[in-house]
Image (cartoon, rainbow, N blue to C red):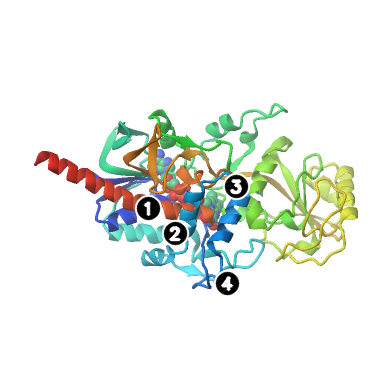
């Protein structure tokens, strides 16, 4: 019997486990993956988005609460719980010292298309180092950790957690934190959620999963069966345009194609379909997976000319290069005439301006559908480069309703001892859209709160039962 059982082994679960242990609870972590794959999607991360009112250690200038909130409001189109979002934002300003205490190091921010020097704190060694540091700290503090332990059932009575089950093993606890990710790794569930499109295709069959293969949503399904309150749209996810040649799972950060805002993107018919320069890339990159998912065959092609090379993070796979546009079209499997026409129309619509990728510049098109509203430079100077892209699902947003204490709800009533954190409750803040680094802000904020609350709940239950005995 443990005070707190933590289901999962990524950032949110680790933050919960560490906080619960620091509050004096005995803690068991059940991680589905083998040790070498521990850490879920968190092992692939690089940074977290942090509010700050003045320059702080690795962050320049200021990123006040209101600006962070407005950024979230914009990307989610209002599909966010303001109270929870603001709580996450405030927590993001004060968590770094605690993270350092548990061995996480930060590095000066990078420059490039993500424009994050001001807003995001980067982990030295990336998410892998962060996860390893937290595991080392957890071991030192005496947290019990079991790998290869995918929880496949929960014992819950009247909204109260009793035990977690892994096959025929049963782990009883006084409280529980669910930090076991979304359901993005379950391709069957994605298929059901997305259904068939008007062309008779099953779009999700062409999705790639950027991270772990272990976030199968099994516990989320168990919670649904048990009547837990859920929120969100199962088709909404952080979904990025990634190189179509990426592996099915765990391709990670390096498969992302960051050339989009510098050129144009066409579908397999050779036609543009969205404003590539709508906003800064960190506020738009997570829309592009969904945009590509809506295109026939769930494939698109990012196209730039030589001017853009060196202005975005290089792709991990070799770019497809040609001296002329018709040649590039043939190499990409597109109709050369249509692509050339699309590019010519785009070039003719580009208005004179002063290109500056660090601001929303005045280089835009006029009279084009869809317009490109910033960074629109004619694509005219060979060699030309193309990248085939597919939807890369990072994490799903459909999950458990929680409050500011990270409590799970059953029929509108907060559970006395069940809490959820990370991807499994991220949809409370992220109804749709994304802004870079907010996933780790959400998981860290809710993870830390859930751990503290679970330790308190366990203590209360223990006191209750000892009074009952007395
Ligand atoms: C390539 C990539 C890059 C990213 N970069 C960033 C970034 O730079 N900044 C940012 O903020 N966010 C980033 N994200 C998103 C970020 O990873 C998530 O928001 C965050 O890690 C979620 O943390 P989590 O603990 O909820 O989930 P995870 O880290 O995925 O952890 C879930 C854990 O639960 C375990 N699990 C699942 N099912 C079970 C079960 N039934 N029983 C037991 N254990 C189970 C899994 O094995 C895993 O360990 C990135 C994601 C990817 C894939």
Whether residues under marks 2 and 1 lie with C-beta atoms below 8 angstroms apart, the answer is: yes
Q: Relative to the observer, which residue lies in front, 30 or 22?
A: 22
- Secondary structure under badge 2? helix
The numbered disc on residue 332 is: none
Q: How far apart are marks 1 and 4 (CA)?
A: 28 Å
Residue 110 position, x and y percent, is 59, 67
Going from the N terminus, do you reach mark 1 or mark 4 first?
4
Q: Name the residue under label 1.
A: 449
Q: How far apart are marks 2 and 4 (CA)?
A: 19 Å
Judge: label 4 CB < 8 Å from ligand 1. no
Going from the N terminus, do you reach mark 3 or mark 2 first?
3
**Residue neighbourhood size for the residue with mark 2, other residues' Cα within 10 Å, grouped as few (<14), some (14–19), many (≥20):** many
Q: How far apart are marks 3 and 1 (CA)?
A: 23 Å
Q: Name the residue under label 4.
A: 61
Name the image quarter holding the N terminus: top left
Q: Relative to the observer, which residue lies in front, 178 or 428?
A: 428
Q: Relative to the observer, which residue lies in front, 130 or 327?
A: 130
Name the image quarter holding the C terminus: top left
Q: Residue at x 44, y 60 (%)?
A: 130
Going from the N terminus, do you reach mark 3 or mark 4 first?
4
Residue 211 position, x and y percent, is 53, 48
- Secondary structure under badge 1? helix
Whether residues under marks 1 and 4 lie with C-beta atoms below 8 angstroms apart, the answer is: no
Going from the N terminus, do you reach mark 2 or mark 1 first?
2
- Secondary structure under badge 3? helix
Q: Name the residue under label 3.
A: 76
Whether residues under marks 2 and 4 lie with C-beta atoms below 8 angstroms apart, the answer is: no
The numbered disc on residue 91 is: 2
Residue 410, located in which quarter of the rendered image? top left
């Amino acid at each position: 019997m443990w005070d707190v059982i933590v289901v999962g082994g990524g950032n949110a679960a680790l933050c919960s486990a560490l906080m619960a242990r620091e509050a004096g609870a005995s803690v068991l972590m059940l991680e589905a993956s083998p040790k070498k794959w521990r850490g879920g999607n968190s092992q692939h991360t690089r940074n977290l988005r942090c509010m700050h009112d003045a320059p702080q250690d690795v962050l320049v200038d200021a990123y006040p609460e209101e600006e962070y909130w407005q950024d979230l409001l914009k990307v989610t189109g209002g599909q966010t719980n303001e109270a929870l979002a603001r709580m996450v934002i405030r927590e993001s300003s004060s968590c770094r010292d605690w993270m350092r205490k548990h061995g996480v190091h930060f590095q000066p921010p990078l420059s490039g298309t993500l424009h994050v020097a001001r807003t995001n704190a980067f982990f030295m060694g990336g998410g892998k180092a962060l996860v390893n540091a937290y595991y080392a700290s957890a071991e030192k503090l005496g947290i019990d950790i079991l790998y290869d332990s995918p929880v496949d059932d929960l014992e819950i009575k009247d909204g109260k957690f009793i035990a977690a089950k892994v096959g025929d093993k049963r782990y009883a606890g006084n409280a529980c934190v669910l930090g076991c990710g979304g359901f993005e790794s379950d391709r069957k569930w994605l298929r059901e959620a997305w259904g068939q499109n008007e062309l008779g295709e099953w779009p999700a069959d062409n999705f790639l999963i950027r991270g772990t293969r272990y976030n199968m949503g099994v516990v989320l399904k168990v919670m649904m069966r048990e009547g837990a309150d859920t929120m969100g749209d199962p088709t909404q996810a952080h979904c990025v345009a990634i190189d179509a040649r990426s592996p099915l799972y765990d391709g990670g950060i390096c498969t992302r194609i960051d050339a989009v805002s510098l050129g144009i993107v066409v579908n397999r018919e050779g036609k543009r379909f969205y404003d590539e320069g709508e906003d800064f890339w960190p506020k738009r990159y997570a829309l592009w997976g969904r945009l590509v998912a809506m295109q026939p065959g769930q494939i698109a092609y990012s196209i730039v000319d030589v001017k853009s090379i060196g202005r975005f993070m290089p792709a991990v796979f070799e770019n497809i290069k040609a001296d002329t546009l018709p040649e590039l079209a043939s190499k990409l499997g597109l109709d050369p005439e249509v692509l050339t026409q699309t590019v010519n129309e785009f070039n003719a619509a580009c208005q004179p301006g002063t290109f500056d990728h660090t601001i929303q510049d005045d280089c835009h098109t006029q009279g084009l559908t869809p317009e490109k509203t910033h960074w629109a430079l004619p694509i005219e100077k060979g060699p030309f480069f193309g990248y085939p892209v597919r939807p890369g699902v990072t994490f799903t947003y459909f999950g458990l309703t929680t409050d500011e204490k990270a409590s799970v709800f059953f029929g509108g009533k907060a559970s006395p001892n069940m809490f959820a954190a990370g991807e499994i409750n991220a949809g409370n803040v992220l109804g749709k859209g994304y802004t870079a680094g907010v996933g780790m802000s959400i998981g860290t904020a809710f993870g830390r709160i859930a751990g503290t609350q679970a330790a308190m709940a366990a203590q209360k239950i223990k006191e209750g039962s000892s009074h009952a005995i007395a």
